[in-house]
Image: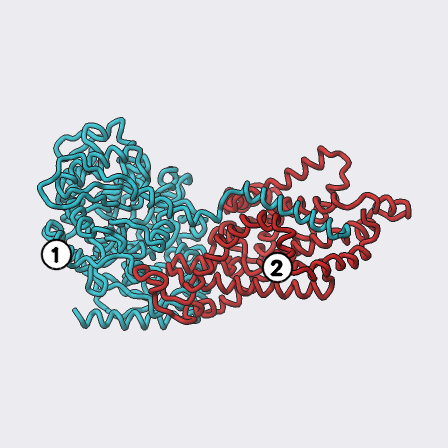
Chain colours: A cyan, B red
């Protein structure tokens, strides 16, 4: 062989070597996908603990895995052991807690389902793609199981929850017993308004905020009067849009009206009106200038201490909740600014489903039932071990030095919130107020209906990009309303929004007729 | 040592054709050791690249997890429809092709220029230093780079808006809302990031060139420029061709990190930053259907595969020696 050929191959060899070294150094980006599948094997291999006294029942020992979003806790093992003791006695089962970080949740759960990993109980919610997963067959239908093993649930849970979380008249998830109604409003710095002498008692509508923000902007230039990252006044919880399922799919009705005609949100008068207000506030400098691109969530902005107010879904104690999470205890207050409603977004806002891969769905349902009825188990899972992770005085609990090792803050995901203890930093009447709040909400005409997007999948896929292109910039007031809205509507039309809305209307009409 | 390249090229055929005359069995018997050495790589290739191809059928299925991949109903070409539903199809294809073509040219011109220049630096230490510094960005994650860019262009606290533009007496620019600048920003970022990597490859090629050529050229009185255009570039042509062909094969696969992270999801910029990969990802985030993503992936692969064959064919017509296969 002659030289050139040889040289070429030498070069190739060198190149390959470099590529190898480089790809070795840059980590195994591509391999991430395969990793999750290793975890289950390890989990299922775990020996089932049976050293406790065999229970009277004839149930075989079984380990139930509980998958939910949340930060893994340092003392998870301790809690599992304590729970195992109680569960072995009651249903001869042990538990495997499987928290997944919020940031990775969507990807992991998607992969978990797609790879058919063996798990039992999985957290699910309407805003987290519940309908999508049900359509893909990821969750078991729970009607029979609920009847057989879920008596404690049906007794304690408002029937509106069960009704309102159905898909095609069937339950695929057991809702948490928590706030049923929803409202929107603002959470603001009460210490600032007191200091500046602003009267907040007359603030009822978004327009009323103009005067307040003007003063705040002038006197406290270090604070952003209204911090938002998307949606602003047109957030579904504030403007009361009911998207009849997934809020990323166009076509909405108004939760606080009785009209059942589905229209694209952009064609609702309220939408444009609120857009104009937002744009006005943006131009006046009330809203953070980077609202359309920032990745700083409002919770983090609160922590930074540079925020005067945010728009929030309001429930009793929302202000205290944000305050304690951001080190502003006692400095925040809230105002409800729209009509209280009951819609699918709340009734199906937090549920526990049973995976189609579960080996013993009946036992999983027994555990869910216990979370709804057994105060000891419920609080153990939510707050840890008494005397270790908290001290208790009646219903009120106080943090200890060891609280940080187990404080998942996920009580709204598990069973019955009305069984929860209350932190001493919260309103002692929290649960009484919740019960009161749950009364008399305006029931949305769409309660219990969830849209199945399968027939218009191609359109939904195409629309997803159009929406991402315009919605955030438009709704945060970052761009001119008239020009952009017209352009946006035209693009939506091109991408087939009418077909999607018509399909939604068709399914919704069929649902209404069947009621 | 080779004296003349063309002669070598012509001569290279002789041993090759004589090999062809041997029967397969004889080849195997003679070179079996090489086959054994190749085995681990082939196993890896089959495991990693061929077995997963089974997943291609997902693109034609309406996936239902309970029924599994094989049990799910077929859906024909429905999963492909959304790709061609809007005018976006044209925009994302145009963006993907134009940006990637631009990147290929930039990744050719700048690294070769720098490789030649680095090769001319007398001090070994300085050459190495430059090379290392240029290589560094290649190891950074796009997420980190997106924050570096953000540090320059953020509305309120970015370097450009808070320091540079005011000191020049210019108006602030809302970078993340200004479409016009992004067709320049993205190539700059991409070139900055990948230049070091390509430079190293071309440097390796240049170092392999025999010094005798340059000595002869110097004696003949050829200038540095002449040496570069007549010796360096022609002799590293095989490497250039291979690198380019490899990149053409991926012309339909945009650098997801670059196009997704760096523009920070600013919708206003989509007309100039949306590429096929980001489009598919955003769709998947909303719809959560692996069928749709598989369809897009399959389409990208088929087009990429065709393009490699096509460009290889073109290269073969021009110079058989430089072709990949």
Is residue A458 depicted above or below A395 in this figure?
Answer: below
> Mark 1 — on which chain does it sit?
A
Is residue B146 depicted above or below A233 in this figure?
Answer: above
Residue where numbered disc 1 is placed: A147
Relative horizontal placement of residue A380, taking residue B73 as reference (left or right): left
Image position, residue B308 (x, y; %): 61, 62
The answer to whether any part of residue A309 appears in the image is: no
Residue at 42% from the left image edge and 60% from the top image edge: B283
Relative horizontal placement of residue B76, taking residue B34 as reference (left or right): left
Q: Nearer the viewer, residue A197 or A28?
A: A28
Residue where numbered disc 2 is placed: B248
Q: What is the residue that sits farthest to the top in this orientation? A: A401
Q: Secondary structure at mark 1?
A: helix
Q: Quadrant of residue A339?
A: bottom left
Relative horizontal placement of residue A194, taking residue A290 as reference (left or right): left
Q: Nearer the viewer, residue B316 or A270?
A: B316
The answer to whether any part of residue A97 appears in the image is: yes
Image quadrant holding the C terminus of chain B, namely bottom right
Image position, residue A456 (x, y; %): 36, 69
Q: Quadrant of residue A64?
A: top left
Image position, residue B52 (x, y; %): 45, 57
Crowding at mark 1 (Cα within 10 Å: few <14, some 14-19, many 20+): few
Residue at 17% from the left image edge and 55% from the top image edge: A161
Relative horizontal placement of residue A460, taking residue A122 as reference (left or right): right
Is residue A192 depicted above or below B304 in this figure?
Answer: above
């Amino acid at each position: 062989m002659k030289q050139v050929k040889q040289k070429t191959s030498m070069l190739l060899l060198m190149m390959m070597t470099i590529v190898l070294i480089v790809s070795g150094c840059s980590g195994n980006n591509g391999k991430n996908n395969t990793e999750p599948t290793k975890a289950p094997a390890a989990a299922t291999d775990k020996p089932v603990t049976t050293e406790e006294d065999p229970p009277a029942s004839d149930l075989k020992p079984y380990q139930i895995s509980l998958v939910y979003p949340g930060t893994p806790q340092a003392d998870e093992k301790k809690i599992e052991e304590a729970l195992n003791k109680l569960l072995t006695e009651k249903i001869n089962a042990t538990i495997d807690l499987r928290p997944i970080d919020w940031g990775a949740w969507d990807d992991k759960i998607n992969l978990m389902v797609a790879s058919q990993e063996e798990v039992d109980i999985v957290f699910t919610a309407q805003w987290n793609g519940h309908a999508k997963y049900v359509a893909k067959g990821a969750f078991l239908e729970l009607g029979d199981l609920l009847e057989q093993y879920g008596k404690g649930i049906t007794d304690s849970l408002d029937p509106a929850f069960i009704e309102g979380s159905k898909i095609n008249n069937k339950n695929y998830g057991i809702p948490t017993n928590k706030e049923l109604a929803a409202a929107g409003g603002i959470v603001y710095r009460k210490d600032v308004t007191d200091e500046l002498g602003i009267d907040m008692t007359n603030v009822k509508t978004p327009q009323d905020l103009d005067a307040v923000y003007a003063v705040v902007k002038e006197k406290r230039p270090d604070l952003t009067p209204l911090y938002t990252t998307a949606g602003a006044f047109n957030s579904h919880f504030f403007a009361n849009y009911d998207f009849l399922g997934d809020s990323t799919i166009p076509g909405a009705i108004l939760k606080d009206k009785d009209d059942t005609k589905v229209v694209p949100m952009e064609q609702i008068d309220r939408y444009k009106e609120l857009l104009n207000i937002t744009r006005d506030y943006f131009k006046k400098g009330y809203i953070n200038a980077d609202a359309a691109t920032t990745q700083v969530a409002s919770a983090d902005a609160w922590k930074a201490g540079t925020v005067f107010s945010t728009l929030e879904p309001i429930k009793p104690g929302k202000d205290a909740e944000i305050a304690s999470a951001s080190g502003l205890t006692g400095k925040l207050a809230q105002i409800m600014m729209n009509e209280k409603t009951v819609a699918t977004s709340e009734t199906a806002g937090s549920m526990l489903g049973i995976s189609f891969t579960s080996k013993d769905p009946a036992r999983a349902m027994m555990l869910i039932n216990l979370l709804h009825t057994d105060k000891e188990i419920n609080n153990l899972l939510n707050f840890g071990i008494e005397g270790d992770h908290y001290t208790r005085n009646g219903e009120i609990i106080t943090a200890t030095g060891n609280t940080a090792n187990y404080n998942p803050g996920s009580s709204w995901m598990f069973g019955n919130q009305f069984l929860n203890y209350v932190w001493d930093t919260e309103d002692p009447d929290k649960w009484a107020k919740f019960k009161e709040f749950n009364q008399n909400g305006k029931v949305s005409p769409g309660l219990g209906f969830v849209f199945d997007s399968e027939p218009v999948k191609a359109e939904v896929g195409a629309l997803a990009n159009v929406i991402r292109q315009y919605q955030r910039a438009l709704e945060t007031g970052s761009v001119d309303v008239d020009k952009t809205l017209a352009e946006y509507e035209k693009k939506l039309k091109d991408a087939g929004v009418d077909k999607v809305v018509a399909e939604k209307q068709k399914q919704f009409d069929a649902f209404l007729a069947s009621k | 040592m080779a004296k003349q390249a063309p002669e070598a090229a012509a001569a290279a055929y002789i041993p090759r054709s004589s090999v062809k005359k041997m029967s397969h069995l004889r080849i195997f018997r003679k070179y079996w050791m090489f086959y054994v050495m190749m085995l681990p790589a082939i196993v890896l290739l089959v495991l990693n690249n061929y077995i997963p191809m089974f997943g291609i059928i997902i693109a034609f299925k309406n996936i239902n997890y309970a029924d599994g991949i094989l049990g799910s109903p077929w859906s024909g070409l429905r999963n492909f429809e959304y790709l061609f539903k809007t005018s976006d199809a044209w925009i994302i294809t145009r963006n993907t092709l134009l940006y990637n073509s631009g990147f290929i040219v930039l990744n050719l011109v700048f690294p070769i220029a720098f490789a030649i220049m680095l090769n001319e630096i007398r001090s070994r230490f300085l050459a190495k230093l430059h090379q290392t510094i240029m290589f560094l960005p290649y190891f950074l994650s796009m997420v980190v780079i997106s924050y570096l860019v953000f540090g320059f262009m953020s509305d309120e606290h970015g370097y450009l808006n808070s320091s540079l533009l005011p000191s020049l007496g210019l108006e602030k620019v809302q970078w993340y809302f200004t479409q016009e600048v992004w067709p320049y920003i993205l190539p700059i970022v991409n070139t900055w990031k990948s230049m070091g990597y390509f430079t190293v490859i071309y440097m390796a090629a240049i170092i392999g060139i025999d010094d005798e050529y340059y000595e002869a050229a110097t004696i003949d009185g050829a200038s540095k420029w002449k040496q570069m255009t007549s010796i360096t570039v022609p002799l590293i042509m095989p490497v250039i061709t291979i690198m380019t062909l490899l990149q053409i094969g991926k012309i339909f696969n945009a650098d997801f990190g670059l196009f997704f992270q760096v523009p920070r999801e600013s919708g206003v910029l989509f007309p100039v930053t949306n590429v096929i990969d980001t489009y598919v990802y955003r769709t998947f985030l909303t719809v959560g259907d692996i069928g749709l993503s598989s369809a897009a992936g399959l389409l990208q692969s088929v087009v990429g595969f065709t393009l490699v064959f096509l460009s290889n064919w073109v290269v073969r017509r021009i110079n058989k020696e430089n072709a990949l296969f």
